[in-house]
Amino acid sequence: MPPATPQAREHRPVLLEEAVAGLAPRPGGIYVDATYGRGGHARRLLSELGENGRLLVVDRDPEAIAHAEEQFAGDQRVTVRRSSFAHLAAVAAELDLSGRIDGLLMDLGLSSPQVDDPQRGFSFSASGPVDMRMDPDAGESAADWLAHAEEGEIARVLREYGEERFARRIARAIVRERARGALESTAALAETIAGAVPASPPGRHPATRSFQAIRIHVNGELEALDRLLADLPELIRVGGRVAIISFHSLEDRRVKRFMRGGRDAPKVVGGVPLPDGPKPPFRPLGRVLRPDAAECEQNPRARSAVLRIAERQA
């Protein structure tokens, strides 16, 4: 298959200026881009650093790492590591960065090259293998999982990770079609899902939620996020900041709860707030940020992005 066109592979970083500004970067600080993608945020962050600054970029996608190594070849300020952000604590320990990081940025969305390459299997806009792995060298592909998962497990994944109200019907259709050997491509999978969904919101393909759910499950995305959030207090120095961009409610709820110290809202009894417990390790900064109309027009994939920023407390 010919390579994707440059236009198809172009990646526009979401909330670029807002995310970098939220970290309030210092020229000599230590920063981490934990989801390199195609480096838009990393390049902008690096532009704020002086000769003594340091930037660690991390990604588990081998294509992203190859891109980073090419982009930053010879720049002594930049360290590139192939890893899931779930293992960032181990990477930081190896580099003697634990507790010294001034700022960490994460963009939890897929990069445009991942979405636009049919061979990766993330999208049904062009047919390809049903893969969906962020790291194609590790773990079970979506096709392998769908080949053996029980109907009830498929329905659970679609319901929990895709918030799909027709999860049971879709799971039943997938099991029926796989018995016929009819799920060999993303196009076939999308068609099967669409045939099981009686209605979907205008402008949204009926397979959208299911593809999201399967991808989240195959990559263990929520478990990876939970692990990193748990490790952040040991990674970020007091006064350091984190900026996290999420794209769906399952991620954003976790990030919001973490930044509020595990509390969804102040607890009130009889109209009187209860006393606060121990001070949480992070405090939210400012309001939630979303792309403006101009950014969404230029980059429709930014529409659902949500940026939250927090600071490490003493």
Image (tube, rainbow, N blue to C red):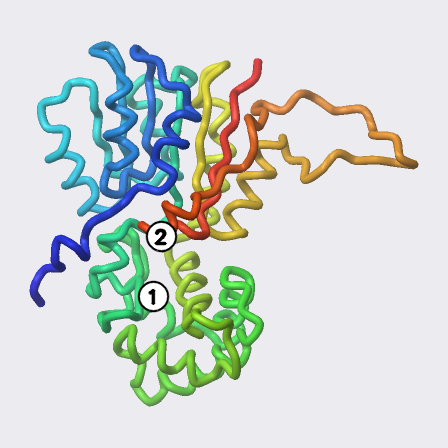
Give the left or right position of residue 74, taking residue 208 as reference. left
Q: Position of residue 249 (x, y in %)?
A: 54, 51
Q: Above or below — where is 273 with respect to 190? A: above
- The residue furthest right is 270
Under circle 2, the secondary element is helix
- For label 1, the crowd category at 10 Å Cα-Cα, with few meaning under 14, some 14 to 19 and many 20 or more, is many
**62 vs 32, nearest the viewer:** 32
Figure disc tally: 2
Q: What label does residue 57 carry, if any? A: none
Q: Above or below — where is 125 with respect to 273? A: below
**222 vs 72, nearest the viewer:** 72
Q: Residue at x 33, y 14 (%)?
A: 29
Query: Residue 47's image quarter?
Result: top left
**248 vs 130, nearest the viewer:** 248
Q: Residue at x 31, y 80 (%)?
A: 188
Residue type (three-letter) at the residue carrying disc 2: Glu
Q: Position of residue 56 (x, y in %)?
A: 27, 26
Q: Above or below — where is 160 with respect to 76? A: below
**217 vs 268, nearest the viewer:** 268
Q: Residue at x 21, y 65 (%)?
A: 118
- Can you say which quadrant of the picture contains the N terminus? bottom left
Q: Earlier in the sequence, mark 1 or mark 2?
A: 1
Q: Residue at x 57, y 28 (%)?
A: 284
Q: Which residue is mark 1?
A: 142
Query: Residue 27's image quarter?
Result: top left
Under circle 1, the secondary element is helix
Residue type (three-letter) at the residue carrying disc 1: Ala
- For label 2, the crowd category at 10 Å Cα-Cα, with few meaning under 14, some 14 to 19 and many 20 or more, is few
Give the left or right position of residue 313, taking residue 205 as reference. right
Mark 1–mark 2 Cα distance, whole angstroms, equals 32 Å
Q: Which residue is mark 2?
A: 297
